[in-house]
Amino acid sequence: MRNSFGSIVTILILAVSALIAPRNINPSNSQTLVQFTDDFENAKFKLGQKGFYQIDLVGQGFTKFHIEACQNGVRYWFKSDHKGNINKQRKIGTCRPPQNAALLSKDRIRQILKSYGFERVKVEQIANINVAVACFGDDRFRVQVDQRGQVVNRRQIGNCRSAISTKDIRASLKRDGYNEIRFTNKRPPVYVVEACHSQRKYRFELNEFGNTLSRKSIGNCRNRLDPRNITQFLEKSGFTRVSVLNDRPPNYIVEVCEKRKRLELTLNQFGDITDRYGIGKCKQKISARQLIRNMRDQGYLRINIKRETNRGYLAQACLSGQLYRIGYDHYGKLQDERQMGPCPSWSIKQVKDQLEKRKFRNTELYVEGCKRGKRIRFKLNEFGDRSDRQVVGNCN
């Protein structure tokens, strides 16, 4: 009997020795411990969003945490997973409300975290918990601050890099050869922008750090209207007498004729008519004879229409002793005027020829002058020789 009792004692001693003997630590166990800590901190954060405070871990199951926490002055015991889901909740007592909760402002929390070396601090107050997202070096953390201003929880949630602006995105796309850049969403965390490259239009989604989340082709890009081609572009559309008043983008302003109506049009950079209104009637084309009549009314002499061009008329005429070369359109509007120098005198033969062109016949030319108080008249031949001297009166 003693031998069997001794054997049992020996077995028990060996079993206890095996349980308390030191073992090598498995790295996977350490990793599991870190994962457990992260899961509890995440559950703690989720519970804080639901209004719990003074959250304490009192036990652990295989998939659940055993937690005691306060809400609205009541102390609870419950089980929670890492997502903050609650079951088997029961009241276990009362809690004192946190002291001086209203005294700890967001500005004070920023000052506290900056004193610890945090930067770019954004604070959110959830129930009675102060939660901040802040940068420490190149890492981004979610930080919990209690009512006494102490950091009670810190969890890394990502990288901390400088966010970019829409101006930075626009400049980057231009460097890559994109144009016609237009933002459809300018507010982070996701920027949405449309841009053209090689006549193809693309839609980009970028995060606040400028990383491309998606890029999709959404069609063809339209060609911009070259200011030099405005007249040709409108004439192909059926307009006539195009006069460009403003050829600088983003809006072009022109005057045109549409049948007998004179219009002022506003075009965008692609040639779309964005505004139009009538400003009168369009004149009809004039003939060369009508143009000569108009020029004579303006004081021009010795008018000669050199030729009719595709753009209108080219005239040569004298005004105040000066010779001018003048271009008119088909409607008599002045297009170009150049002074060519003094207007040359005609010979007697040229004068006779001009008169004969006007259907004068048997033309004779005379000249009069005063000498010694008498007014004398001479007849001139085509060479300027004088004949038929006559006294025709006295000179004043």
Image: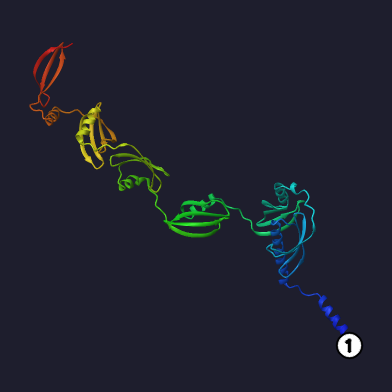
Q: Is residue 216 left or right of residue 99?
A: left
- In which quarter of the view is residue 160 placed? bottom right
Q: Position of residue 280 (x, y in %)?
A: 32, 36
Number of numbered discs: 1
Measuring 52% from the left and 60% from the top, which residue is drawn there? 214
Tell me if I can see residue 55 in this picture.
no
Q: Is residue 137 above or below residue 19?
A: above
Observer-nearest of 357 and 224: 224
As shown in the figure, which amino acid type bears the numbered disc 1?
Ser
- In which quarter of the view is residue 94 placed? bottom right
Observer-nearest of 223 and 117: 223
Q: Position of residue 178 (x, y in %)?
A: 46, 54
Which residue does the numbered mark 1 point to in the structure image? Answer: 4
Measuring 48% from the left and 55% from the top, which residue is drawn there? 176
Tell me if I can see residue 29 in this picture.
yes
Observer-nearest of 230 and 108: 108
Measuring 73% from the left and 50% from the top, which residue is drawn there? 112
Q: Is residue 323 above or below residue 148?
A: above
Measuring 48% from the left and 54% from the top, which residue is drawn there? 194
Q: Position of residue 24 (x, y in %)?
A: 77, 74
SS category of the residue bearing label 1: helix
Q: Position of residue 332 (x, y in %)?
A: 26, 35
Observer-nearest of 241 and 273: 273
Quadrant assignment for the N terminus: bottom right
- In which quarter of the view is residue 141 placed? bottom right
Q: Is residue 202 left or right of residue 129?
A: left
Q: How is the image coloured?
A: rainbow
Q: Is residue 196 left or right of residue 376?
A: right
